[in-house]
Image (cartoon, rainbow, N blue to C red):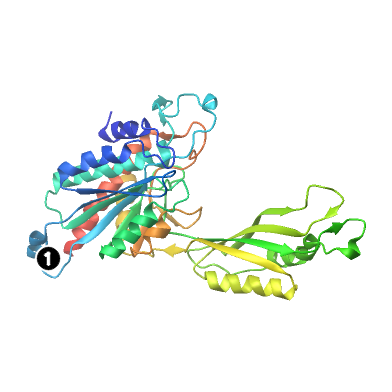
């Protein structure tokens, strides 16, 4: 059993359903302190939803950096991730207990095996190996872990980022351990994500008896032409890195439950997933213009879940690509597809953010697992990235 696999199994065995951490961060901090990391626990959130966050950093040795590269300033690489997992679902449907790591058919089963305790273990062991070979690196190394990525994401990474920004902490590179691969570890990384913005539209009418429609005003009928127009809009054409912006209705609520009553209002929930070709302001303005054109009486509440971010090829993407190529022989695919991640918060304070982790086919599913053959290569890729960025500091 490799040290990466051993630590992965330890982490899986710690039940940590959002917002619980289950002791994962303490275990990781205990591994990091002997390596020179200063570990800080930041607890946030209301009493009924306490979130545990870990910020751990090991600074480079300034004198050594200055001696070997007088014009350089030590860069900071952050490994970011989450120790929380989603609920197991019906335990009876699992082939083995979800928080008891189990091996079958060359796979490691357990909740969090793919999302994302394998990545966390690979972070730690890659750092241990790197520092054993480079006891005085030219690179600052940090970990940012939260127990609120799978939850509301209000008191996790976003809260730590605010605290770091207030301190003037400078971050240069960030690798988020989200499971991004498809068939083999390293075949795909995320170098950006689309923005997400939701709206709750309440269209007002006049309630009345369905047999006397002239005495009422049906808000469902009123909003239907506007929805049809919104469905047909091309919001933007996307670009080389992002697909076009999309608009989707997720829920429609109307009616009193009676079949003979015209409702007084209808509520429409919708969401934009948007590229860097659009802004929240431009999308809001265009949608409001449609509603105005249809002369609707409405209320609209917007929720911006996250701005899009993009890391174009450069030092971090190049270091990751080279590490994957050297370890696996794969030419990784850059992608911005999928949902949101905590990368959206980190990108606000760190100019270069990528996501790299194991295959994601079983995340959030019953019998979540990761192939044993994918674990050690992931650790080695992280280790190679550390080597590449450490050398780049001296360039």
Above/below status of 295 relative to 247: below
The percent coordinates of residue 38 (x first, y second) are 19, 49
Answer left or right for 334 relative to 33: right
Is residue 311 something that shows in the picture? Answer: yes
Please determine whether, in this image, residue 225 is positioned above or below residue 262.
below
The residue pinned by badge 1 equals 69
Going by the picture, which residue comes out furthest to the front?
47
State the image coordinates of residue 389 (x, y, percent, origin top left): 23, 57
Where residue 24 sits: x, y (%)?
A: 32, 38
Rendered location of residue 219, percent (x, y): 78, 62
Please tell me in which quadrant of the rendered image residue 108 appears. Answer: top left
In which quadrant of the rendered image does the N terminus lie? Answer: top left
Tell me how many marks there are: 1
Front residue of 311/292: it is 292
Tag 1 secondary structure: loop
Where, quadrant-wise, is the C terminus in this rendering? bottom left
Residue 315 in sight from this viewpoint: no
Q: Nearer the viewer, residue 250 or 39?
A: 39
Residue nearer the viewer, 73 or 142: 142
Q: Residue at x 34, y 64 (%)?
A: 349
Please name the residue shown 40% across and 56% down the image. 343
Q: Residue at x 26, y 42 (%)?
A: 124
């Amino acid at each position: 059993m490799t040290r990466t696999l051993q630590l992965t199994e330890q982490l899986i065995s710690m039940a940590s359903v959002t917002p619980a951490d289950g002791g994962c961060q303490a275990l990781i901090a205990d591994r990091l302190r002997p390596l020179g990391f200063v570990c800080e626990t930041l607890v946030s959130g209301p009493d009924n939803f306490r979130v545990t966050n870990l910020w751990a950093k090991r600074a480079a040795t300034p004198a050594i950096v200055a001696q070997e590269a007088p014009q350089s300033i030590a860069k900071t690489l952050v490994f970011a991730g989450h120790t929380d997992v989603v609920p197991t679902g019906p335990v009876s449907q699992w082939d083995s207990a979800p928080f008891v790591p189990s091996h079958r058919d060359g796979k490691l089963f357990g909740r969090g095996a793919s999302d994302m305790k394998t990545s966390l273990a690979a972070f730690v062991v890659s750092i241990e190996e790197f520092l054993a070979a480079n006891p005085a690196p030219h690179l600052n190394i940090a970990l940012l872990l939260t127990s609120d990525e799978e939850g509301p994401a209000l008191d996790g990474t976003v809260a730590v980022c605010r605290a770091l920004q207030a301190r003037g902490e400078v971050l240069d590179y960030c690798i988020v351990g989200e499971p991004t691969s498809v068939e083999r570890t390293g075949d795909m990384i995320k170098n950006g994500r689309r923005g997400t913005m939701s709206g709750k539209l309440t269209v007002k009418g006049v309630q009345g008896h369905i047999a006397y429609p002239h005495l009422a005003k049906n808000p469902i009928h009123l909003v239907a032409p506007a929805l049809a127009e919104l469905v047909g809009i091309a919001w933007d054409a996307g670009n080389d890195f992002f697909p076009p912006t999309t608009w989707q209705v997720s829920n429609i609520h109307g009616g009193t439950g009676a079949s003979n009553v015209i409702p007084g209002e209808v509520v429409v929930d919708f969401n934009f997933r948007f590229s860097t070709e659009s802004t929240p302001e431009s999308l809001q303005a265009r949608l409001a213009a449609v509603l105005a054109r249809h002369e609707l009486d409405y209320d609209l509440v917007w929720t911006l879940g996250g701005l899009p971010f993009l890391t174009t090829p450069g030092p971090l993407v190049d270091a990751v690509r080279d590490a994957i190529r050297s370890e696996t022989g794969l030419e990784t695919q850059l992608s911005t597809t999928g949902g949101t991640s905590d990368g959206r918060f980190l990108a606000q304070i760190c100019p270069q953010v990528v996501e790299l982790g194991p295959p994601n086919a079983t995340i959030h599913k019953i019998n979540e697992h990761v192939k044993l053959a994918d674990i050690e290569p992931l650790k080695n890729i992280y280790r190679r990235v550390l080597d590449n960025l450490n050398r780049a500091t001296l360039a």
